[in-house]
Amino acid sequence: MPKGQGEVVPEAPFRSYYGQPVVKQPIWHEPHMPTYLYLGGLSGAAGAMAAAARVAGHDRLGLAARATAFAAASAGTVFLVAELGRPKRFLNMLRVFKPTSPMSVGSWTLAAHSGLTGVAAGSAVTGLLTPVGDAASVAGGLSGLAMATYTAVLLADTAVPSWHEGMRELPFLFSGSALASAGAALMLTTPRAQAGPARAAAVAGAVTEVVAGEVMERRLGLLGEPYRTGRAGTLMRASRALALGGGLLAAVAGRSRALTALSGLAITAGALCTRFGVLEAGRVSAKDPKYTVVPQRERLDAGRPAPVPGR
């Protein structure tokens, strides 16, 4: 064979950008941000349950739900301010309202939800201005639906590969986890004879959380790898085991104080593991360029290039 004929340089595997990360890693800190994500979801779901309990006539459950929603929103605000560094930065986020920015919408949602849950809880505890408290509870229930899910939208709206591509399941994962968290908290703070709706919420939320997490990891393929390996994998497996075990215990606990306590603690720990695990998986996917480059190459090869914003 003449020299130069038939000699083909094998195509280089396109898995990196000179070995450097293509996108910036999230700079959010632990435990501030994942704890805020947990508390925000807890407050949102508890606010929605408070409104539902008022309509259904479960007054004792409604009182516990209002108090839980306000306490979680207050604590969550503290963690968010700690993440930002100082309170002025949070106030600066409220200077403008941008409907196209999940961060801006989330800041205003948190501010409104915290105020509404404060009025609702204050009225329930003091017995004053009941119509105002009920109206605030209903409005807090509506804002709670946004609180339970907006953080998932916030993550999916970034360029972090394993968050962005998980946009279909992350809202279900976070809302399910939030519902389970609220159910667990209300099981522990409501007399057992009146905690039936809380137990049902804990079971439904735990099942949703487990199914959404499993579906997301399977659908993402390569981008699901950060959720299955390393520290994030350990946290996500622990979250599913705890949510599943806690949900099962909630279903069979009945009026058993010990089983109810174990169930509530397991679900709470599982929800925290979910937030820490998702945050860590995002960091891993942003740090390794293959999670950005390989899916882009596969989309180009399939004739499906990623859309360019603004075109």
Image (cartoon, rainbow, N blue to C red):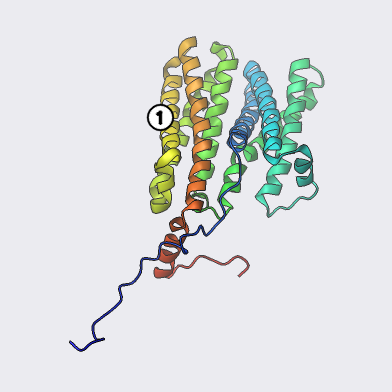
Q: Position of residue 235 (x, y in %)?
A: 45, 35
Q: Is residue 306 above or below residue 175?
A: below
Q: Is residue 112 above or below residue 283?
A: above
Furthest toward the front, the residue is: 3
Crowd band around label 1 with a 10 angstrom C-alpha radius: few (<14), some (14–19), many (20+): some
Residue 113 appears left or right of 178: right
Q: Amino acid at mark 1?
A: Ala
Residue 302 appears left or right of 267: left
Towards the viewer: 296 or 288: 288
Residue 85 appears left or right of 45: right
Q: Is residue 224 visible?
A: yes
Q: Quadrant of the C terminus?
A: bottom right
The residue under label 1 is 241
Q: Position of residue 48 (x, y in %)?
A: 63, 31
Q: Residue at x 79, y 41 (%)?
A: 88
Q: Position of residue 136 (x, y in %)?
A: 75, 30
Towards the viewer: 223 or 173: 223
Towards the viewer: 202 or 245: 245
Query: Image quarter for residue 16?
Result: bottom left
Residue 91 appears left or right of 7: right
Q: Quadrant of the N terminus?
A: bottom left
Query: Image quarter for residue 151?
Result: top right
